[in-house]
Image (cartoon, rainbow, N blue to C red):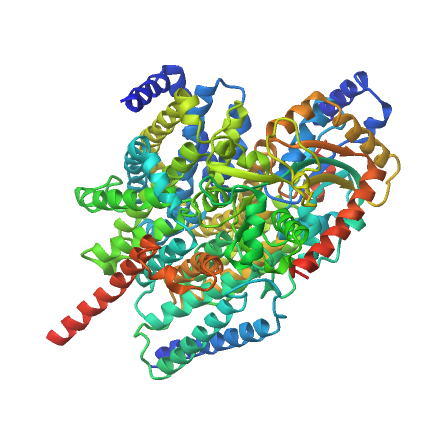
Amino acid sequence: MDTLQFLLDGFLVALAPGNLIWAAIGVLVGTAIGVLPGIGPALTVALLLPVTAGLEPTAAFIMFGGIYYGAMYGGSTTSILLNTPGESGSIVTAIDGHAMARKGRGAQALATAAIGSFVAGTIATLLLTFVAPLMVRFSLMFGPAEYFALMVVAFITVTAVLGQSAVLGFASLLSGLALGLIGTDRQTGVARLTMNFPELLDGVGVVIVAVGLFAVGETLFQASRYRFQKEEIYKIRGSIWMSREDWKRSWRPWLRGTFIGFPIGALPAGGSEIPTFLSYAVEKRLSKNPEEFGHGAIEAVAGPEAANNASAAGVLAPLLALGLPTSATAAIMLAAFQQYGLQPGPMLFASNPQLVWGLIASLYIGNLFLLLINLPLAGVWVKLLLIPRPWLYAGILIFATLGVYSVNNSVFDLALLWVIGLAGFGMRLLNVPVAPCIVGLILGPMAEQHLRRALAISQGDLSVFYNPMTHPIAVTLMATALVALVVPMALRFRSARQA
Amino acid sequence: MKKFFVAMLTAGALAASVSPGFAQLERLEIIAPAGAGGGYDQNARITQAIFQQYELATRIQVENQPGAGGTIGLANYVNSNQRNPSILMVGLSLVGAVLTNKSQVTLDDTYPLALLSGEYQPIVVKADSPFKTLDDLVAQFKADPGSVSWGGSGPGGSDHLMYGLLAKAAGMDPKQINYVVLTSGGEMLSGVMGGHVTVGTGGYSELAAQIESGELRALAIGAPEPIEGINIPTFIEQGYDVQLVNWRAVVSNKDPRGEERAALEAAVAKMVTTPEWQAALDQRGWQNIYMPPAEFAEFLKSEQARVEVLFKDLGLL
Amino acid sequence: MQAISRLRMGHALLGALLLLLALAITIETLQHEPIQQQAVLGPTFFPLLISAALTLNGVALIFKALRGQIDDNEWLELQFLPVLVILGGLTASFFLLETAGWVICSAITFTVTASAFGERRQGINVSVGLIIGVLSFYIFNNLLGLSLPGGWIIDNYFSN
């Protein structure tokens, strides 16, 4: 068992006292900067990479691991507390996480996010150690047809966020799909629905829409209602620790989230959005109280957060085993390798095992420190919400502006934020759920691209979606989607007939 | 306090000054018309570091202005009145983006300062692909054009242009290329390695590890003549008139703004002779293809003309 | 009773908006010249598909709204003035961002929003807004090397 030996060696190095201090500093700095809006994990790591350049490789990678996990957690913190998701992986967290904060359960939401991330990180590290090469071979089998089938599965998640009225939920979903059409068509270069604004050629940013609908729309809604509801909405009631009930409701979602997130994260075009959506949908379907979803169900924070973290670890599998950078953060890790003159790729495991396993161990230690440092801090973070509401909302708007502006340095994006914020306000008034809109915006363009690629490659032959001999994975996924859609309907039909 | 600091910096710069021409480049802004991490951004940041180290300019800032293939950064650059000296990173992909996006502002609205670096692209197939040579691949493309899928980044990018050149060199209509857009380097690699697209391409450095380990087979590279250290035959050696370098360059204001242009030219000319510059290029697998303003202006003209023709041939215009 | 009908009106209006959106997408899409590249599904397939779905959904929404079949929630009591004030504040600060700079604009956003929520101590509002603006400006520009616009005050008096 060479692998295990290498991993243990990696841990021995990473656990030297000097290195632990770097891990702690990394987590603190990473969290502090990750909390800033518009600065997701990839950018945080990119900004802090020069800081680590002066250190020797092991210490640098350990600090790097801390920064990385700190930044991820920082993003979830703003989603939960301020309803301002800084990157697409924490959008789902905002739905129920912020609802929990409004009920005074922000500390529990932060805790389940932190512990869930830790659990996911732990399991993902083990998976990475033992099944990474296998995983990667499997993930190479995913081509456009398989991705499209995965998108079809992901679209089922929409049913989990549609809300009480299907016709309103679909209105939101379709608006999101329409928004997703805006911009240059990637396949042909044709500009679609850009209304001659060059700023729209790259499409409408997911972060702008999420921040607009969640943070700005919500602020406007609260402003219009302020006179009529005087009770303190964020007031913390009872303990700030997770209760026995919270633990009971969290542990399964953590595990399920991990096993959804890791394999999809390992796919070259998997990303962090689909695993978080899927985790949400799965938890809602399995929950005994699905009606709580959208109003602060702890499972809806625990699952997606674990999935998000596990998918981030999954990204390492193709990076380390094949040298494929499949996410922005992975691309930056490549840069970190290059800083030390290492060429990542298929040979890295063989040529530099100490470093690879040192990195894996470092990431794990970063993960552990995140838990040790941020869990006690959750109670402090939620105190932020006790700021009087006029200042809290004014601060949220500044955060929203800052986040949206700093992505592209563009005032146009702010104008867009204004329009989308107003639309979000309108949707609140009419009880139209906003989550389907964001799901549509993210999944629509992906589904379109993969479908068109698949058909281009097969030259119009649709059998790539139903012939199990040539595309077993795609067919399996399609069948899963069908079952997930039809079975609940059939059950409802049967219970309606029995009643 | 800040004044004092600047005074110290300037004093230091003067004491160590190599040429009086450099003294005017105070608060130089380097604009990368793309997000952090890409080719433009890396060129900008390398330039920043070397300018700083050799005191070719002071208080240098890099600004990222991503959007629309770089045309947003280009339009902002041309349309704003800069108070401080500023330069813009440009390249082959921007020449194409100006055409696809029907941008009002083009590279003709800037002053070509210098051609900096370039990357030659190999075309690759999967290790167990039936196509052992470029001729095998071309034969299949001629026999059944649709059956060969060509993976590449956005339409009209260097990948697409190279496939277009190959189709033309093989006597085929470039519109018959079954072009499949794969948006990131990771998607490209996995698309070819997984056998989902027939052919892939990209900067040599992005594919080098997989080529060396034998996961990918390189059939040809777009360089005009064989490159030392890269064991891939060129297209020309194999009888196809295809050569393309994915070049990056730096431009400045159309208006010379006093001595500023001369100082910039001198600073860039100095930079490309430093060992740090060469080391930075080597690390990324880029070639040093420096050309001074007059030469670069001519090169730019010919590239613009060539890209426009190719765009028509590819059905993009 | 009247309260419920207002929500219904809103839903019917939303349905009409969806129909308009569908129409706009269809018109825009049909204006594209046919592409000359190889493609099984061109760039117009998805827009047309989505606009068809929008049309169906819009019609369904109008029908259901008029027949009162959507939901039985009540129209909430609302004040529109604070919303307009906040939107006005945001407009002003977005327009001024590149001339007046980030610090001034965040002070405007903060003050206007806090006032809209009924916080009348303008001295505190303005100071807190300025402090947040200065802090975030310092962190982004000096520590992280990003570029928020300084505006004429910082550019002329503080940077050098």
The foreground one among A111 and C88 is A111
x, y (%) of residue C39? 54, 63
Residue A254 against residue C112 in the figure, above or below: above
Residue C96 visible here:
yes
Q: Quadrant of the C terminus of chain B?
A: bottom right
Residue A25 visible here:
no
Residue pictured at 38% horizontal, 36% vertical: A317
Q: How many marks?
A: 0
Residue pictured at 37% horizontal, 80% vertical: C65
Specify the farthest residue to the left. Answer: A498
Residue C157 against residue A102 in the figure, above or below: above
x, y (%) of residue A379? 32, 37
The foreground one among A106 and A310 is A310
x, y (%) of residue A390? 46, 52
x, y (%) of residue B24? 82, 30
Q: Is residue A372 left or right of residue A199?
A: left
Residue pictured at 68% horizontal, 30% vertical: B48
Q: Quadrant of the N terminus of chain B?
A: top right
The foreground one among A6 and A423 is A6
Q: Is residue B257 left or right of residue A20?
A: right
The foreground one among C74 and C78 is C74
Q: Splitting the image into 4 quarters, where does residue A361 fall?
A: top left
Q: Is residue A302 left or right of residue A76?
A: left
